[in-house]
Structures are given as C-alpha cells and as structure tokens.
Amino acid sequence: MDFYYSPRGSGCRTVIMVAKALGLELNKKLVNTMDGDQLKPEFVKLNPQHTIPTLVDNGFSIWESRAIVVYLIEQYAKDDSLFPKDPKEQALVNQRLYFDMGTLYESFAKYYYPLFRTGKPGTDEDFKKIESSFEYLNIFLEGQDYVAGDHLTVADIAILSSVSTFDIFDFDLSKYPNVARWYANAKKVTPGWDENWNGLLELKAVFDARLSAAKQ
Ligand SMILES: N[C@@H](CCC(=O)N[C@@H](CS)C(=O)NCC(=O)O)C(=O)O
C-alpha cells in the first residue's frame, strides 16, 4: 500500500509506528509540503484536503492519521489489542484519540507553529492550553501504565507521537510525573520508536535552520 508522508509529521510518525506494530510494509512516498508537493493535481485527486499522511490501499484512499491507523488495525491486525472490540474499551481509546487530536496536539500547533512561521511562539494563553492538556493527561495516567486500559493501544501510539514532538522542543515533562513515567515506558515498548525519533531529529534540524536564517 502507498503511504504519502514526511518523516517529520506527527500524524505520519503515528502511522509508521502502528504499521510497524502490525508488521505491515508501507510503500513510502515522500511528500515535501514545504515545496508544495501536496498541491499537485495527482495528489489532490487522492486527497482533496491535500494533507499528509495519506494512505492508498488497493485504490482505497484514506487520510487523517488517526482514521488511517484505526483502518489498518481493523483491516489487518491479528487481534484486537491495539483497538479493542469491546464497546467501552474502544470508547476509551476513541476518547483519548480525540483528546490527542483536538486538545493535546492542537495545543502544540497553536503555540509552536507560529515559531516555525515567524520565529515567535504563540501567546501566554496558548501556552496555558499546553499546560492544561498535560495536566489532563497526567490525570488520565494516575495509577495507569497506558493511556486507555491496561495494555498498549493505538491511543498510546498517537499520544506518543504528540508527546515526543513536545519533547524534541524541550517542553518540560517533569512537572507531569505520570506522563513522564508513561513516556519512558512507551518509548521502550512501542515498535518503530527509533524511526519516530529520527523523524523528530529531522524536524528539529529544519526548525533550527529556519530560526537561524530568520535571525540573520
Ligand atoms: N489531523 C491531520 C493533520 C494533517 C496535516 O495537517 N498535515 C500537514 C503536515 S503535518 C499537511 O499535510 N499540510 C499540508 C497542507 O495542509 O496543505 C492528521 O493527523 O492527519
């Protein structure tokens, strides 16, 4: 299956880790959004919203990283451990996935994306949203080793992608002890962690180069 991606993107790294956990081979096709590759007509035909990651499985095109990973599990997983079939267990996983997209990663985007574009971060108010997101995550993880239930699920992997993105930008996790403990373990037990981290190193290098160019 064709996987349109960048190693630097948070959603792309989520898909890479889940595919690894499932033992799936992705036919990786690099899309450079800084060069506008995603706006080319052949890509817009696959995904009119022109976002990466986008997966094309035998002619079936799907985007939104969390929708992609749930599809991959439902279609290819040997068991339901990453995305439980039990309605309540699954609801908890979904709640965490929506929290990741709408609250946690959203708080990253609000505060850090302006840094990429202008060299200046978002407002103090935006930073407070990051802190409250981490406070919530810290509460979810009270007495828990995983974000939803008692074992690794797709929610851990999506949230690992987000939390590691904060980490590479030196956000201080030590104020959130349950998150720090979960993160140390998630890094060890999640297949594809190394590829996730390599993508982040690339992201940081691009960011540092942009910042120093903006200062000149
Ligand atoms: N919520 C989406 C976010 C996708 C997204 O915005 N991707 C960015 C790169 S990280 C992109 O493709 N931007 C190019 C564009 O929107 O034209 C997901 O998780 O897949």
Image (cartoon, rainbow, N blue to C red):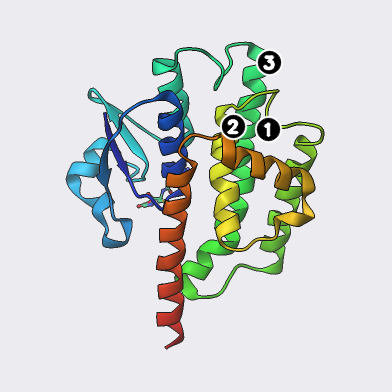
Q: Nearer the viewer, mark 3 or mark 1?
A: 1
Is residue 192 left or right of 147 when viewed as pictured? left
Of 5 and 143, nearer the camera is 143
Upstream in sequence: badge 1 or badge 2: 1
User: Relative to 179, does residue 55 appear above or below in the rendering?
Assistant: above
Q: Position of residue 56 (x, y in %)?
A: 28, 30
State the separation of the CA atoms marked 2 and 3: 14 Å
Q: Determine crowd level at label 2: few under 14, some 14-19, many 20+ residues with C-alpha closer than 10 A.
A: many
Kindly identify the amino acid type of the residue bearing the numbered disc 2. Ala
Of 88 and 205, nearer the camera is 205
Q: Position of residue 78 (x, y in %)?
A: 45, 13
C-beta proximity under 8 Å, tags 1 and 2: yes
Name, please, the residue furthest toward the left.
Answer: 42
Residue at mark 1: 147
On the question of residue 60 being in view, the answer is: yes
The image quarter in which residue 202 lies:
bottom left
Residue at mark 2: 155
Upstream in sequence: badge 2 or badge 3: 3
Of 190 and 33, nearer the camera is 190
Q: Nearer the viewer, mark 2 or mark 3?
A: 2
Name the quadrant of the N terminus.
top left
Is residue 207 left or right of 24 when viewed as pictured? right
On the question of residue 64 being in view, the answer is: no
Residue at mark 3: 88
Name the quadrant of the C terminus.
bottom left
